[in-house]
Amino acid sequence: MNIDPELKKKIKLIVTKSRESLLIAYQLYDQSHYNDAVSKAYYGVFHALQAALLTKNLSFSKHSGVMAAFNKEFVSKGLFPKHFSQRIARLFRDRLVGDYEYNETVSHEDCQQDLTYAKEIALAIEEYLTHEGFLNI
């Protein structure tokens, strides 16, 4: 398969942004900033989802569009496990709590679980991108 070098470059840049977000999420977690850590963890996954969607020439401006398209193009076709859908939805929901809620916060335990989910999803997407020839690490 002949993949456009510009597409590969763009995907690599997005994956780098994903990795940086996850790294910052873990740093924030270590400093007990759970709301912010969950937000950065979600964005780590969000960027990875966008990179995967680019392999199908798909791009969306809204978070709901990115999540729905990933589920349609990847999860429903068996390229990623079904539980990714629920975990991505949880990350999004917790990100909303962390970023916008005043009467509710993300707990240490929820943050820890979210970081585990985010890392699992982002790594799986990177493996897919590498396997399909879109990412050379």
Image: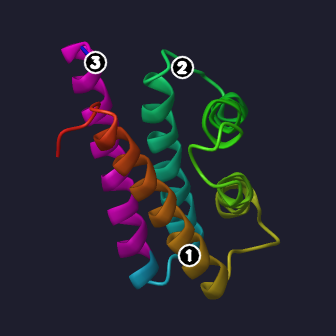
> Position of 40 compared to 21: left or right?
right
Q: Which residue is mark 2?
A: 59
Magenta span covers which residues? 3-28
Instruction: Verify whether residue 21 appears in magenta.
Output: yes
95 or 10: which is nearer to us? 10
Indicate which disc, 1 or 2, sits on the residue closer to the N terminus: 1
Q: Main secondary structure of the magenta part?
A: helix
Q: Position of residue 88 (x, y in %)?
A: 66, 54
Which residue is at 66% across, 79% downward? 110
Q: Amino acid at mark 2?
A: Ser
Marker count (numbered): 3
Q: Which mark is residue 110?
A: none
Q: Position of residue 121 (x, y in %)?
A: 51, 57
Which residue is at 29% across, 31% downward? 134
Q: Position of residue 38 (x, y in %)?
A: 56, 65
Q: Amino acid at mark 3?
A: Met
Q: Which residue is mark 1?
A: 34
Indicate which disc, 1 or 3, sits on the residue closer to the N terminus: 3
Q: Which residue is mark 3?
A: 1
Q: Quadrant of residue 84?
A: bottom right
Q: Amino acid at mark 1?
A: Tyr
Separation (CA) of disc 1 from disc 3: 43 Å
Which residue is at 26% across, 34% downward? 13
Q: Secondary structure at mark 3?
A: loop
Separation (CA) of disc 1 from disc 2: 30 Å
Instruction: In the rendered view, tell whether residue 133 sits above or below residue 94.
Output: above
Instruction: In the rendered view, tell whether residue 98 sits above or below residue 50.
Output: below
Badge 1 vs badge 2, beta-carbon distance below 8 Å: no
Q: Secondary structure at mark 1?
A: helix
Q: Secondary structure at mark 2?
A: loop
Between tags 1 and 2, which lies in front? Answer: 2
Instruction: Verify whether residue 99 appears in magenta.
Output: no
